[in-house]
Image: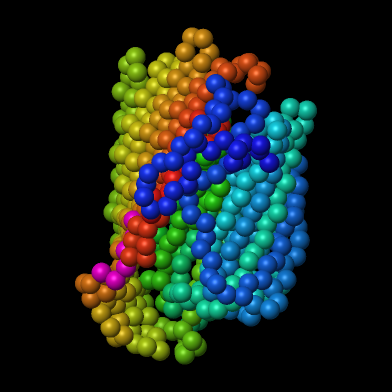
Amino acid sequence: MSMLAGATLLVSTLFGTGAAAAHAADVPPQFGTDWHDPVTAAPQVPRPHTTSCRVTLAEARFRDFSPYRGAYTPPRGCGERWSKVVLRLDGTVKGRQFDRLGYLHVGGVEILRTSTPEPSPDGIAWRVEKDVTRYSDTFRRAQDVEMLIGNVVDDTYTGVIDVEVTLTFYAGRPASPAPDRVLTLAGTPGATTLTTARNSERIVAEVYATGSGGGCEEFWYLTVADPAPYSCKADRGPYREVQIRVDGQLAGIAAPFPHVWTGGWSNPYLWYVVPGPRAFDVRPVEYDLTPFAALLDDGRPHRVEVSVVGVPAGQSGWSTPVNVLVWQDAHRARLTGALTVNRATDLADSSVYTPGTQNRVDTEAGHRLTVAGYLDTSHGRVATTVTRTLANHSAHRWTDGENADGLDATWTDDEAVTTAGAAGPARTTHTHLTYTVNGTTTLDPDGRLRTVLTLGDRAALVQRQGGRRTAWWRLDDTYSGDATYTVNVPREQRHAVGTSSERYRRRGSDGCYDRSLTTVQGVLTQDRIRC
C-alpha cells in the first residue's frame, strides 16, 4: 500500500461546518514513484444494523486472460432473505501496468463490471463497494463463479493484479422487494432468447454496456465520419445508442455512459488518485420492459437482442451482457394482457464537418420511444407506459496532426414510467440523466503533453402519486483534472505534474451527502464533507 495513503493529508475531513482545518503537507514538485492509493468521493454503501454473514467469492491473481473459476455457497446464519447484500473488491498492484477491464459472474449473472487503476512502481491498493441486493435470487443457491480481469505481464508490463471479492449478507427484509428471479439470456450472441415465468408482473433488463478494447470504440465520442481527417473513424460520427429489441420490436433505448478509464485521454497522471466517475463500478443501463410482459408471459422463448447504434459494421469494441430482473404475482399463476403502444420517432443523427486551421465536427442527435401495455393481475388491471427521450450535442475541434484535440459534449437520457391500476392513483417515476465531457489535449514542440478535462455524471429522480411528489433526489458527481508530462521518454524523465478534484453531491427526500477531494502530484490535499 502507498506510504502516502494518509501521511500527507492537508485538509482534514470535516462534518457540518464546511470550515477548513489545514496543516503543512509535503507536496512534491512532480510525481515520483509513490502516490496516494486510489480514492473516490462517492459514499460507501450504507449497512443495516442487523446480523451479518460474509462469503468469499474470489481470491485471484490476474497475469493473463485466464479467468478465475470457483464455487459459491449461500451463507449460513443469516436466513434466505436479506435486507442488503454488499459486494466488496479489494485489489493491489505494483510496477507498471495499463488499466484493465474485468467482470464477475455468479451463476452466469454479471454482478460486477469494473476497471483497474494504473499502479505506482511502489504499489497501490484500492477498494470497490456495490449494493448487489437485487441479485438475491441468484445468491440463494450454490453457483459457479467466474471472474476475469484480462492482463498482460511481461518484461515491460510487470503489474500482477491481486484481488479478493467478498459478499456480506445482512439479515432482514429489504426496503423494497428484490426481484423474484434474475435471468440471463440463453443461446449465442446474436441469437439469444428469454423465457420468463407466466406470472411475471414487472420486467427490467439491465445491460452492462462498455466501449473498450483499446481501439476507437473506447473513445467513441471522438470518432468522425468521412471526409473529416481524423484518426478514429465511424460511418456517421460519434453518436451511440444502446437499443434492446424483443422479437424484433424496439423495446428500449438508452444513452451509454462516456466512461474514461484510468489511462484515458492520453494522460494517466489525471487518474492516479481520483478515477473518473463510474470507472471502478460500471453501472448498467436499465430498460423497463413491463409493457412487453403480456407478450413474454406466454411461456415460450422470445428473441432478445442488444445492439449499439453507430458502431461501424463488422467492428468490435462493445460489450453488452444482459441480466433480466423479474417480479412475479404471488397470487396468480398466469397473467394475460397486451402491448398497446410501440411508437418511436425517426432517429436524428447529424454530424457536420467544418474544415480549417482548427477542424470541427458538430453533432446533434436524438431519439424518442414510447411503449405501453397492460396486465390483468390478482389486484386488477395494471397499465404501464414508458417514455424515453435521448439527446446528444457535441463539438469536436482539432488541428492538423491532432496536436490539439478537444471535445465539448452533453448527453441527456430522460425517462418517465407511469403505472395506473385499480389499487390507487397513478404512480409516475421520472428520471433525468445528464453526462458531460469537456476537455482538451495539447502537445507542444518540446514534447510536453497537457490534458485539461472535466467530466460530469448527473441525475435527478422524482416520484409522484396522484400528482403529489412522494420522493425525490438529485445527484452531481463532477471530476476535474489538469496534468502535464513529457512524452516518449523514460518514466523518470517525464517530469509529470497534475492536479485533480472530485465533488460528489446527492440531496433528496432521504437526506444529504456532499464530499469533495483534491490532489496535487499524487498527494491527497483535501478531503471535505459538507453535509
Decide which of 137, 480 is in the foreground and name it. Answer: 480
Q: Position of residue 504 (x, y in %)?
A: 42, 48
Q: Which secondary structure dominates the residues rendered in magenta?
A: strand
Q: Where, by quadrant of the figure, is residue 172 drawn?
A: bottom right
Decide which of 513, 433 is in the foreground and name it. Answer: 513
Quadrant, the N terminus: top right
Residue in the image at 55% along x and 72% along y: 49
Decide which of 12, 343 is in the foreground and name it. Answer: 12
Q: Where, by quadrant of the figure, is residue 189 drawn?
A: bottom right
Residue 214 in sight here: no
Part of the protein shown in magenta: 469-474
Decide which of 405, 359 is in the foreground and name it. Answer: 405
> In the rendered view, does 364 fall on the left or right side of 503?
left
Tell how many labels. Answer: 0
Q: Residue furthest top?
A: 445
Display coloring: rainbow
> In the rendered view, does 488 fall on the left or right side of 418?
right
> In the rendered view, does 374 fall on the left or right side of 209?
left
Q: Position of residue 288 (x, y in %)?
A: 41, 66
Q: Where, by quadrant of the figure, is residue 55 drawn?
A: bottom right
Q: Position of residue 328 (x, y in %)?
A: 48, 80
Q: Residue furthest right?
A: 155
Q: Position of residue 247 (x, y in %)?
A: 47, 65
* Above/below status of 88 relative to 220: below
